[in-house]
Structures are given as C-alpha cells and as structure tokens.
Amino acid sequence: MADLGAIVKAYDIRGVVGEQLDASTVRDLGAAMAALVRGEGAQGVVIGHDMRDSSPELSAAFAEGVTGQGLDVVSIGLASTDMLYFASGTLGLPGAMFTASHNPAKYNGIKLCRAGATPIGQDTGLATIRAAVEAGVPAGPGGGTVSNRELLSEYAAYLRKLVDLSGSRRLRVVVDAGNGMGGHTVPAVFEPLPFDVVPMYFDLDGSFPNHEANPLDPANLVDLQKRVVAEGADIGLAFDGDADRCFVIDERGEPVSPSAITGLVAVRELAKDPGATVIHNLITSKAVPEIVSEHGGTPVRTRVGHSFIKQTMAETGAVFGGEHSAHYYFRDFWKADSGMLAALHALAALAEQEGPLSELMAAYERYSASGEINSTVRDQAERIAAVKQEYGARDGVEFDELDGLTVSLPDGSWFNLRPSNTEPLLRLNVEAADAAAMAALRDEVLGVVRA
C-alpha cells in the first residue's frame, strides 16, 4: 500500500505518479470518499481532470472506486479546478478534481469537495478517508454508473454573467496558459468578449515544455512580460496548471501584486453589495483592509490557507476573499476560488476607463512588499522565539500570533514569519512604506532568522 501519510496533505492528496500515487491507491481513495459522502446522503460524485498524462487513468480508477460503493459518477473530462467547483455547485454533487496544480510533470493529485464546492480537508473528511483506506474499505453494493457531461460552455456563460463586460473598450490581452488548463478554458470564456487575445502555450501538455505552470515563481513570468511589451498589449494574464490562480502583468511588463488585485476586486464587489464583508489573509498588503474600509466594507483577516478563507466566508457571509498567492474567492461562485473570475474583473475594470493598467492599479499599490522568502532552519519554534525576543525589546512594537508571528512596527511597516507545515522552513513576508525601508527590514529579520 502507498504511504498515505506522504501523499495526504492538509487540503488535498498529492504525490509522484507510480511511486506514491497509482491506480490501485486511487481506486481505494475513490471508494473511501464515496463511502463518506454516501453516509451523508450523496447520490453521486462529479469528476474532472487536468491535462497530465496520468490524469485520465487515475480519474477512471477513482470512478471505479466510487461506482463500487453504489454511487453514480458524472465525468466532465478535461477541466480547470474552478470548472470542477462549478460542476459541484450546479449539479449539487460532491466532486473530485485530478490535478497537481503547479507541481512538476511527475506529480498528480486529487482535490476533493462536498456538494456546493465545500472543501474536504484534513479536519473535514480527508483524515477519515485516509483512515478508511488504511483499514481497508469494505466492499460496497456496486451498481453505480458513469455518465459523461459537457459543461465547458455552461461554465463560461456563468462566469460572463457574473462580470458585466457590456460597456468594455477593445483590449489586447496576452494570455500565458503555461500548457495548463487555461488553454482549455480561456478560449471558451473569452470568445464572445471584446478582446484581441494573443495566446501563449495554449497546447495542453502535462510535461510543461516551456516553463513550469507556477506563476508565483517570477522566472515563469518572463516570457509573458516580454510578450506584453512586444505586442503593445493592454494587459497580460498568467494561469497556473489547473487555472484556479491568475497573475496579472501591466502594459509595461511589470507584475501587478495579487494584493492589489484583491483590493480592486473587493471595490467592485462592494459596489454591488455595499457594506459587505471582505476576507483577506494576513500576508496580503495592509492596503487591502484600508481600501475595503474606505469603500464601506468590513475587512476580516484570516490565517493563510483556502480552508480558513472558505470557513470564514461561510461564517460571515463575505462577498469576496483574496490571498496574496493569487487565490480569489467569490460568494457568487459557491465561496470557491476562480482565477478566471478574477481575470474578468481585472479586464472589466481596465476596459471601463481609458488609462493604462499601471495607472489604474497605482491606487491599490500603496506599499513595498518583499514577496515570500523561505529560510531552512533546524528549529522553527526556536528561531521564531529569537525574532520575538529581538523585537520585543523595542518600543511600540506589537505582536500577533494568529498564524506564525506577525510583528508591527511603529513606522507602519510589518512582517510575518510562519513555519511550513511540511518542510523545515520559515516563510517571511515583509511590507514597508518604500523599497528601501522594506529591504532594510527584510535583511534585518533574515539576519536574526538565519543566525
């Protein structure tokens, strides 16, 4: 049996195909998931998969496990992760998405949800599924069926309905799909819209021949940045492998901070629902809660991680949530994340005015941020304690331990230091008034962390 402890993560299942993840293990996982949701009254499961070579075989094995438990399977075939959430929401079925997102080609994985795209994580069923597989899932009644359903056009129409692009000026848009699922979904969503799309790497290819489909790494944005400038485009969009995250490039070829996109979309959603709550995680720019408050909304801060965002959205009825990792969550989309929906908001905001994107975003880019910096340490707790001791001796410094250690300084600058759950790493995010102040604080904190 596969080492489930190595592949069952906090929010999903992920591992190296053939070594950690194979058809037999996936079949058992399908049976265990089906037994769990059948006990909760579910009648079936919807399954989608990305473009990786192993995805069709693994998703078919999972379907065998589900039908063996007497539940029916609706297969939507090739899909982005947010398309699977759309299917779960519209069909009212639990779902399984086969993808390893931005991970290299040798990986695959499964993202699970209950009906209505409610996530299944460690605390909400994933641990139960793992335990059932380890114990041996009892044989089910069998008799489940598999049917195929085409949902791409319905998904595209639903997203276009959520963002008004009727008054848009024509835009030249460069899109880098990274050979991932954006190459499947972007043509369907954008086809009737007033955009001249310049496609990059739209061929579905799970070997990622051009660059990894991970736009969080600046190296993977270089091709898009150059192309935006060369084309004289208005905007560039980069999607990750399963197209649930979207990164934005302005007309100068400069990356737009995901925090700034969070602020922009928050303002647009608050215009539709004045006074609503907006969720942001604690490493987004402090500009986000400022902007939300200025526009009459209520900002609510959460830990990093989609399960915390979605849980808090459910508790507060929030209209929108954003993370600095470029995950964007929408109440109108079953509180699930959709990179495509965030992209449509950015395009609509740009198309509603005549100025360039850099000018539009200037109001949302208020501070200088370091991005996430990882340090390998022997003892995470000991290094965090050392940082707390260093800054605790200073006047006017405030601490917050919602997620790791957040330190706020009297001049308005701040940093967050939090441990990785899976590696011996500390992750640092720093923000200050300008680049020089940010660099000085960043280097000072790293000096303590790496001492």
Image (cartoon, rainbow, N blue to C red):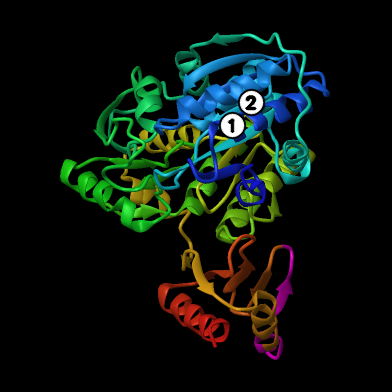
Left of 397 or right of it: where is 325? left
Residue 274, given in percent of the width and then of the height, sits at 67, 36
Identify the amino acid type marked 1: Ser
Q: Which mark is residue 95?
A: 2
Q: On the image, which quarter does residue 90 sit in?
A: top right
Q: Check the image and report above or below for 133 versus 152.
A: below
Is residue 296 among what the camera can see?
no
Q: Residue furthest front?
A: 1
Asked which secondary structure carries label 2, the reply is strand
Q: Residue at x 50, y 15 (%)?
A: 151
Q: Residue furthest left?
A: 230
* Disc 2/disc 1 C-alpha distance (Å): 19 Å
Left of 151 or right of it: where is 360? left
Identify the amino acid type marked 2: Gly
Q: Residue at x 58, y 52 (%)?
A: 291
Q: Alpha-carbon neighbours of circle 2 within 10 Å: few (<14), some, or many (≥20)?
A: many
Q: Alpha-carbon neighbours of circle 1 within 10 Å: few (<14), some, or many (≥20)?
A: some
Q: Within the magenta stretch, is there residue 154?
A: no
Q: Check the image and report above or below for 20 versus 422.
A: above
- Of tags 2 and 1, which is closer to the observer? 1
Q: Nearer the viewer, residue 435 or 119?
A: 119
Marks 2 and 1, the one that precedes in the sequence:
1
Q: Nearer the viewer, residue 202 or 168?
A: 202
Q: Which mark is residue 24?
A: 1
Q: Within the magenta stretch, is there residue 393?
A: yes
Q: Residue at x 27, y 30 (%)?
A: 197
Q: Residue at x 45, y 58 (%)?
A: 365
Left of 383 or right of it: where is 252? left
Is residue 387 among what the camera can see?
yes
Q: Which residues lie in the magenta part?
A: 390-402
Q: Nearer the viewer, residue 74 or 343?
A: 74
Q: Which quarter of the rendering shows the N terminus?
A: top right
